[in-house]
Image (cartoon, rainbow, N blue to C red):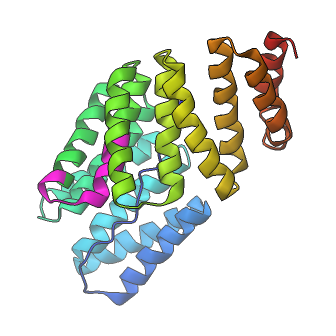
Amino acid sequence: MVRILSTLFLLFTVVYGNEEVDRKISKAWEYYEQGRFIKMERLSKEILNQSLKMNYPKGIAEGYYYLGVAYYSMGNIEKALNYATKALEFSEKYSNYRWKAYAHTLAGEILRSMRKYTEALKHFKKALDLSRENKNRKMLPAAYANIGNIYFEMGNYRKAVQFYSRGLKLAKKLDLRKSYIALEHYNLGLSYYKLKDFDKALQHLKEAYNIYSSLKDKKSVADSAYYIAKSYYKKGDLQKAKRVLEKNLPTARQTGRVGSYTKLLKKIGG
């Protein structure tokens, strides 16, 4: 399964006006990064209510957005979409393209989770257009990846490759964080695997595996190794497939992935 890239970023809006609200905004996102979504929800409500009373646009825009993120993270899709829509509607009143881009991204991610791919794609393409129009290169890799994810889930793997490749190329140029580059390699590897181009799949999956190993991300190491082994298996190189599985079996056990490893080893005859 494609590993959906997390696209819900801190807004970094350059607007000043209320230090108390701005501190709360930073704290709310800190809760998100810690996975404390109930605390994020509560604080985001405070931010929104306080900002509505004082008519503070930044707090209103980010209050709606953060509540959408919090509810989406907690699995409350109906409320998440409601606040994403409010964030979109509010952002249209202002010239701040980041508010618009992130609201479109959130709406797209929610709709993707609902399998409403055509609608999701419209939002992701709008976020891409906004990033291009405003020459924000740092926002482009995630925008490309989001569109790639949609095409992957729709089964259009060639299109997915096109957008993942654009995102990866730019991410490398911008020297983005290693985990992001690894994820782009992983998604490309899976796309090529689906296209039965196992040599290219191996090329990208090995890149992902090496980066994840350096980051000590055991779950991602296990996932990458599994698809490396499957690619070798599909190529008919059973010994290499077996070696990869056996080498990474302890990691698979530690991360709850041993079942898929065991099944593939049985197919190989290990």
Say which quarter of the image contains residue 251. Answer: top right
Instruction: Where is residue 61? Give x, y as percent.
Output: 28, 65
Residue 143 included in the magenta stretch of the image: yes
Q: Nearer the viewer, residue 17 or 173?
A: 173
The residue depicted at 32 percent of the width and 25 percent of the height is 159
Q: Nearer the viewer, residue 224 or 153?
A: 224
In the depicted structure, whether residue 214 falls above or below residue 188? below
The C terminus, quarter of image:
top right
Instruction: Where is residue 12? Give x, y as percent.
Output: 33, 71
The residue depicted at 75 percent of the width and 15 percent of the height is 238
Q: Main secondary structure of the magenta part?
A: helix
Question: Where are the magenta residues, as a range?
Answer: 132-145
Q: Nearer the viewer, residue 42 or 256?
A: 256
The N terminus, quarter of image:
top right
Say which quarter of the image contains residue 256. Answer: top right
In the depicted structure, whether residue 4 falls above or below residue 156? below
Instruction: Where is residue 235? Give x, y as percent.
Output: 62, 14
- Judge left or right: residue 113 versus residue 107: right
The residue depicted at 25 percent of the width and 40 percent of the height is 123
- Judge left or right: residue 220 versus residue 24: right
In the depicted structure, whether residue 64 falls above or below residue 51? above
In the depicted structure, whether residue 229 falls above or below residue 181? above
- Judge left or right: residue 168 versus residue 270: left
Instruction: Where is residue 260? Give x, y as percent.
Output: 76, 24
Residue 180 included in the magenta stretch of the image: no
Q: Nearer the viewer, residue 235 or 253?
A: 235
